[in-house]
Image (spheres, rainbow, N blue to C red):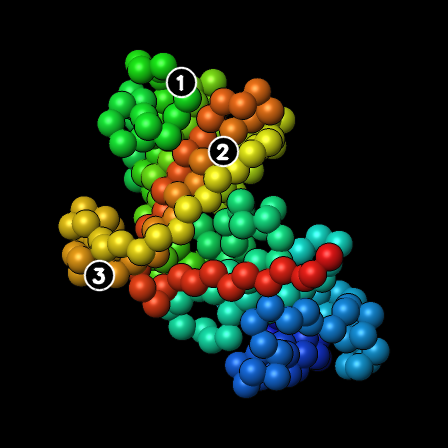
Amino acid sequence: MTLSEHDPTFRRYHNIEAALREGILSGRLPVGSCLPTEHDLTRSFSVSRFTVRRAITRLRDRGLVASRRGLGTFVIANREGDGFVQSLASLEELLQYPEGTTRETLTIAMAQALGEPASEMDYPDGAEWVQLRAVRRLRRSGQAIGFIEAWVAAQFADVLSRPNPQSLAVLKQIEDWHGHRAFDAEIQIASGGLSADIAEHLDAEPGTPALVIHRRYRGEDGRVYLLTKSTHPEHRFALTLRFDRG
């Protein structure tokens, strides 16, 4: 159902959205901070939980906030531009891809564990892998924020052809469909430049500075089953790390 701007319900959740959005864009609600609880917002604005949730959903669609189960809704970006800021408060979140993005598949093909990826994998030469090449985009604008390459062990590669309406990361797809969880993860973050091929898919100039993130995942058996590489042009993606002292 689509609500008219003259509908009272529309005005109520639009007012909540506008107030929270102003707080985020002005810096009063900084990146990494938690929004007031649903209970607090329903009391402050004298509205129902449904109305509050509609407002939060609109902020999420704008790429400004993300919800973390059991923790609340956090600010992940302080502007509605082409960039995307991912605020992280735990290792688990670092293994995932942020809400507010979609994965556009370019190619899925068989690949041998040879060359550069082979040195990162513990399988013998000639083992079967499936390679995914894709682009991550912002849902709200379609802006490309990253080029994704993933090498998936053949026994889990069926997830790449399964429905994925939420655009989950391959890691999460494998966990959901096969129950195979990452027991160990190694993550390397480095700077680099865009190759001509990747730049073309990201609508950027070759050689543009980029953030390059390598992720290597092992199962409980100690064997690598997923290797990913994501390349993000400057000003389109950033990581904000926030860890509390235990």
Q: Residue 11: percent from the left, percent from the top?
A: 66, 80
Query: Dot 3 surroundings within 10 Å: few (below 14), some, or many (20 or more)?
Result: some
On screen, residue 30 above or below 228:
below
Query: Dot 1 surroundings within 10 Å: few (below 14), some, or many (20 or more)?
Result: some
Which of marks 1 and 3 precedes in the sequence?
1
Which of marks 2 and 1 precedes in the sequence?
1
On screen, residue 114 above or below 1:
above
Residue at image point 38% right, 35% down = 150
How far apart marks 2 and 3 lie (CA) works out to 28 Å
The disc placed on residue 210 is none
**Residue under circle 3?**
208
Residue type indicated by callout 2: Tyr
Residue type indicated by callout 3: Thr
Q: Residue 217: percent from the left, percent from the top?
A: 49, 33
Residue type indicated by callout 1: Tyr
The disc placed on residue 123 is 1
Query: Dot 2 surroundings within 10 Å: few (below 14), some, or many (20 or more)?
Result: many
Residue at image point 24% right, 27% down = 115
Left or right, residue 82 beside residue 70: left
* Callout 2 secondary element: strand
How far apart marks 3 and 1 lie (CA) works out to 34 Å
